[in-house]
Amino acid sequence: MFTEIEIKEIETIKDKDINELKILLANKTTEMLHGEEAAKNSEQAAKEAFSGNTLGSNLPKVNIQSNKIEEKINIIDLVLLSKLENSKSEIRRLIKGNAIKINDDVISDEKFEINKNLFKDNYLKLSLGKKRHIKIELN
């Protein structure tokens, strides 16, 4: 449980930066449930996913065969393969709402074709909305 020192820290942080407090509480909860190592990995994955600077080595990943890319897979099929969404109509709605990104670039065309140029070191980052991110890896 929280010690008296941690409660004082919470009281101090809540008045300064509520987002910092959210991070502290999320890390502490993860540590209590899954251990210190899992908490560190989770925090690093969140930083990578939301910073937009990297593909996120700690993001969950999906492997796809490189021949799928050569077959001219479109953005809708890529999202279906990633299993982040299972409804084509929902994927189209997300595209219209500018909620789908590849490598942090908004995809606004439902016929957008995925090609190997989008992959950096055989990876690309697929994002749906603000909170769902996954790394697509070519085999």
Image (cartoon, rainbow, N blue to C red):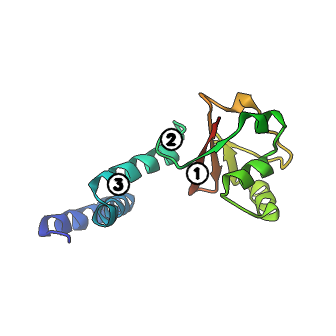
In which quadrant of the rendered view does residue 121 lie?
Answer: top right
- Position of the C terminus, as image quadrant, is top right
In x, y percent, where is residue 82?
Answer: 67, 52
Tell me the CA gap for discs 2 and 1.
Answer: 9 Å
Q: Residue furthest right?
A: 111
On residue 122, the disc is none
Q: Amino acid at mark 1?
A: His
In x, y percent, where is residue 18?
Answer: 37, 62
Mark 1: secondary structure = strand
Tell me the CA gap for discs 3 and 2.
Answer: 16 Å
Other residues around mark 1 within 10 Å, as few (<14) / some (14–19) / many (≥20):
many
Of residues 16 and 20, the one nearer the viewer is 20
Mark 2: secondary structure = loop
Mark in the foreground, 1 or 3:
3
- State left or right for residue 83 relative to residue 44: right
In x, y percent, where is residue 60?
Answer: 53, 49
Residue at mark 2:
56
Residue at mark 1:
133
Q: Residue at x 30, y 51 (%)?
A: 37
Q: Amino acid at mark 3?
A: Ala
Q: Which circle's residue, 2 or 1, is located before the other in the chain? A: 2
Are the residues tagged 2 and 1 within 8 Å (C-beta)?
Answer: yes
Other residues around mark 2 within 10 Å, as few (<14) / some (14–19) / many (≥20):
many
Q: Which circle's residue, 1 or 3, is located before the other in the chain? A: 3
Are the residues tagged 3 and 2 within 8 Å (C-beta)?
Answer: no
- State left or right for residue 114 relative to residue 3: right
In x, y percent, where is residue 124?
Answer: 63, 38
Mark 3: secondary structure = helix
Tell me the CA gap for discs 1 and 3.
Answer: 18 Å
On residue 38, the disc is 3
Of residues 63 and 50, the one nearer the viewer is 63
Q: Work out whether 108 lies above or below 65.
A: below
